[in-house]
Amino acid sequence: MEREHLIKPVLDHPYPTVQYGKGVFLYDDQGKAYLDGASGAVTAGIGHGVPEIIEAMTEQASKVSFVYRSQFTSEPAEKLAKKLSDLEPGGDYWAFFVNSGSEATETAMKIAIQHWQEKGRFGKNKVISRRMSYHGITMGALSMSGHVLRRRRFIPLLEDFPVVAPPYCYRCPFKLNAASCKLACADDLETAIKRIGAEHIAAFIAEPIVGAAGGAIVPPEGYYKRIKEICDRHEILFIADEVMTGIARTGEMFGMQHDGVEPDLIALGKGLSAGYTPMAATLVKDHVMAPILQGSKSIMAGHTYSANPQSAAVSLAVLDYIEKHQLAQAAQSRGVYLMAKLRQLADGIEIIGDVRGRGLLLGIEFVRNRDDKEMFPPAAGITARIIDKAFHKGLLVYPAAGAVDGAGDAIIVAPPLVITEAEIDLLVLLLEEAVREVMDELAR
Ligand code: PLP
């Protein structure tokens, strides 16, 4: 066999070669179709091969693709920053553009720390996050992530930032239920702040809905209102990591809108360019920028490709497309349809313990025993097996961390927001076949 040069995620795994994408389908070079049931990595929000985006890309490329941000600004970058601020109901956000979700959360961390430094409060430089969280793979973002598997190799190099309990109602860390819940998971933040001292803490970071580390875990009602109130009372900035939930995915433009909370900083990525080009952003509220504007007047962050005009033009076209086709509303209504279908499926399949999520960001947790929520042992690799079976049937779904750090085996189902009901029916059919085949294997 000819030797390979590309480092792929698993080096001895055979990957099909993609040929093209159209709508919610991808096609490999053998002509096999794959229903993109998770928008890749919850990214291809408007589907593949959309002509309007390709036109916007070509038009911008014919003018200029790259300028260095220390030498020029560009119309697409300026317009995109304003557009994002206008889309957030609270408005008043500045935008800093980067290339990945990891850079967006890490930049949010740096801006939060700089905010306090400009005010002369140099001790405020820790960021609290939660267990079962994922904020990215770069060292700063990983330091803030409660994702055991991705941290493991680098533990000695990571900042030992504090973590608090996740809002994981299906397996409540405080053994409470809907009736007895008094938002102990939110109050856990206050306990940590008192232990560490607010004078050492710059920010708290959380995903509106836990994605990769849990499988679309929605916090209990009132959780984020309580979190924001605790943060404000202790002078701690709240960073919403909307890399997965942002840009219409949950049925609103931003996931935090469901909770009526305006974060001090917002990290965006994935759906912001819907996968057409690398693009991510850190949105920063006016009051967070104010001491920086009065002080050093510059953010100590950024990359060669930051605010790239080509990528900004693509993101603007993606946002236009989402508005024109009312895809936030589509995520809401099709999410209801998909959720109902998955719940129906769960009725007949005893290893489905929980179906959850919001809009078109849904999760399914698998259990050995539905009554006592007993987990499968990690060695059984249930998440990976279900994903693999689905893949062979031509259905792509996304793994959550899977049976580590208190999280159960779970997958994310998050198709492009343009998916039709007939395509959802096909998705659920293929998923059912995959899960039943794994169940049959377990019974043998
Ligand atoms: N934050 C969240 C919530 C994510 O889901 C991810 C990626 O899965 C990231 C940050 C990191 O984004 P990226 O992979 O683009 O660096």
Image: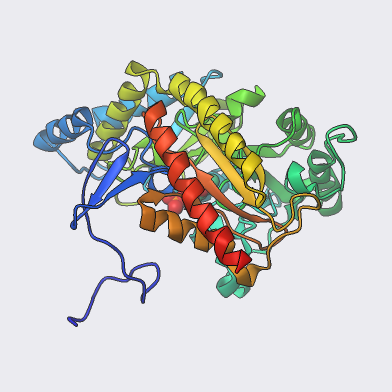
Give the residue at x 32% y 35%.
Answer: 47
Give the residue at x 50% y 43%.
Answer: 413
Residue 258: % across, % down: 62, 24
Residue positioned most to the right? 180
Residue positioned most to the front? 444
Asked if one can make out residue 315 in the rendered structure from this viewpoint, the answer is yes
Q: Is residue 48 above or below residue 100?
A: above
Quarter where residue 280 is shown: top left
Q: Nearer the viewer, residue 44 or 97?
A: 44
Quadrant of image for the C terminus? bottom right
Residue 4: % across, % down: 23, 77
Q: Is residue 149 left or right of residue 376?
A: left
Coloration of the structure image: rainbow
Q: Nearer the viewer, residue 163 or 75?
A: 163
Residue 254: % across, % down: 52, 28
Q: Is residue 193 above or below residue 82?
A: below
Quadrant of image for the N terminus? bottom left
Give the residue at x 32% y 38%.
Answer: 24
Q: Is residue 430 left or right of residue 306?
A: right
Q: Is residue 73 above or below residue 15?
A: above
Residue positioned most to the left? 62
Q: Is residue 150 left or right of residue 22?
A: right
**What is the count of numbered marks?**
0
Q: Is residue 23 left or right of residue 135?
A: left
Residue 214: % across, % down: 62, 50
Q: Nearer the viewer, residue 393 or 286?
A: 393
Q: Nearer the viewer, residue 120 or 259?
A: 259
Asked if one can make out residue 158 in the rendered structure from this viewpoint, the answer is no
